[in-house]
């Protein structure tokens, strides 16, 4: 069994996930803004806990299979939260495209906007090049849905290499169905930070997913518009405008069934 190495940066410490981390990780996955970018279903407490347990097993087992994986990320800086607090994960997964490890990370929203994600990813990449023979590092990003991650990987030196077809990314039909269900729940009932952002993101993602043949787009679009119009917390948006936002976002997703692929070669 490969020992999961410890790692530390200025404000963070990294170690292997423990089964006892599942409830704290589930609380992070309960944030729709976290789950929207990682293909996890956080639409109920039970699903959050199941997703947390599955993620812990996935990240830990990768170390033994590939010699790299993702760490539990805990705070060492009391200015953000009590030291030792689990705030997310960061590390590497088997590549979806190309041959180099793929950087993966996710943090609790309370840690966004203060450079923690960049610090975590930079520390992980430094470890990768210092301790493994990886020739480079990749990132796969839902480009219109995760502008923050694009800024982070570009800051770290990764550049746009190309795109990856959605059908290649979702090798599991069950996973795609779960994401579709999560996005329908998010549009109709989930808490949000900004109404217009949600009204774009969920229909866009669902539009992408319909290109996989999961549902008939002509049938699902009216349902999405109805779900959005029924939400009282969207009441400040004109109904005609709301319908147009949802429709435009959905159709854009249908026209863009791909993710962006960023890459950086090992520094010489």
Image: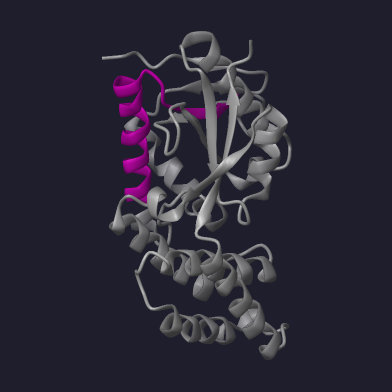
> Where is residue 57 shown, x and y percent of the image?
31, 34
Instruction: Looking at the picture, tell me which residue is in the foreground, 217 or 92.
Output: 217
- From this viewpoint, which residue is outermost toward the front? 162
Colouring method of the image: one colour
Quadrant containing the C terminus in the rendered view? top right
> Where is residue 165 shown, x and y percent of the image?
46, 52
> Where is residue 19 shown, x and y percent of the image?
32, 33
> Where is residue 14 shown, x and y percent of the image?
51, 22
Instruction: Looking at the picture, tell me which residue is in the foreground, 46 or 119.
Output: 119
What residue sits 61% from the left and 83% below the top? 232
Q: Is residue 212 above or below residue 120?
A: below
Q: Is residue 225 left or right of residue 170?
A: right
Q: Is residue 239 above or below residue 136?
A: below
In the rendered structure, which segment of residues is drawn in magenta? 49-76
Quadrant containing the N terminus in the rendered view? top left
- From this viewpoint, which residue is outermost toward the left? 1
What residue sits 53% from the left and 22% below the top? 136
Instruction: Looking at the picture, tell me which residue is in the foreground, 216 or 50.
Output: 216
Q: Is residue 219 visible?
A: yes
Q: Is residue 86 visible?
A: no
What secondary structure is the stretch in magenta mostly built from?
helix
Residue 228's quadrant in the figure? Answer: bottom right
Q: Is residue 223 above or below residue 259?
A: below
Q: Is residue 83 above or below residue 246?
A: above
Residue 154's quadrant in the figure? Answer: top right
The reply to whether the magenta stretch includes residue 60 is yes
What residue sits 33% from the left and 56% below the top? 46
The reply to whether the magenta stretch includes residue 203 is no
Residue 216's quadrant in the figure? Answer: bottom left
Q: Is residue 170 left or right of residue 190?
A: left
């Amino acid at each position: 069994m490969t020992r999961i190495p410890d790692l530390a940066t200025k404000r963070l410490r990294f170690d292997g996930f423990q089964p006892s981390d599942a409830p704290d990780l589930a609380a992070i996955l309960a944030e729709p803004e976290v789950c929207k970018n990682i293909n996890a279903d956080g639409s109920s407490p039970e699903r959050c806990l199941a997703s947390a347990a599955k993620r812990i097993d996935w990240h830990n087992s990768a170390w033994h299979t590939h010699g790299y994986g993702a760490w539990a990320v805990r705070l060492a800086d009391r200015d953000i939260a009590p030291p030792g607090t689990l705030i997310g994960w960061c590390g590497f997964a088997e590549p979806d495209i190309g041959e180099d490890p793929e950087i993966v990370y996710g943090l609790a929203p309370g840690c966004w906007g203060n450079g923690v994600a960049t610090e975590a990813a930079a520390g992980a990449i430094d470890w990768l090049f210092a301790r493994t023979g990886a020739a480079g590092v990749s990132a796969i990003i839902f480009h219109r849905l995760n502008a923050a991650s694009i800024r982070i990987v570009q800051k770290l030196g990764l550049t746009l290499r190309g795109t990856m077809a959605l059908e290649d990314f979702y090798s599991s039909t069950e996973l795609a169905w779960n994401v579709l269900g999560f996005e329908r729940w998010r549009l109709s009932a989930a808490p949000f930070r900004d109404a217009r952002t949600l009204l774009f993101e969920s229909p866009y993602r669902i539009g992408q997913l319909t290109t996989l043949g999961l549902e008939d787009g002509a049938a699902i679009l009216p349902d999405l518009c109805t779900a959005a119009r029924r939400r009282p917390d969207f009441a400040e948006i004109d109904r005609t405008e709301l319908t147009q936002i949802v429709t435009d976002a959905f159709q854009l997703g249908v026209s863009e069934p791909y993710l962006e692929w960023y890459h950086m070669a090992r520094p010489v």
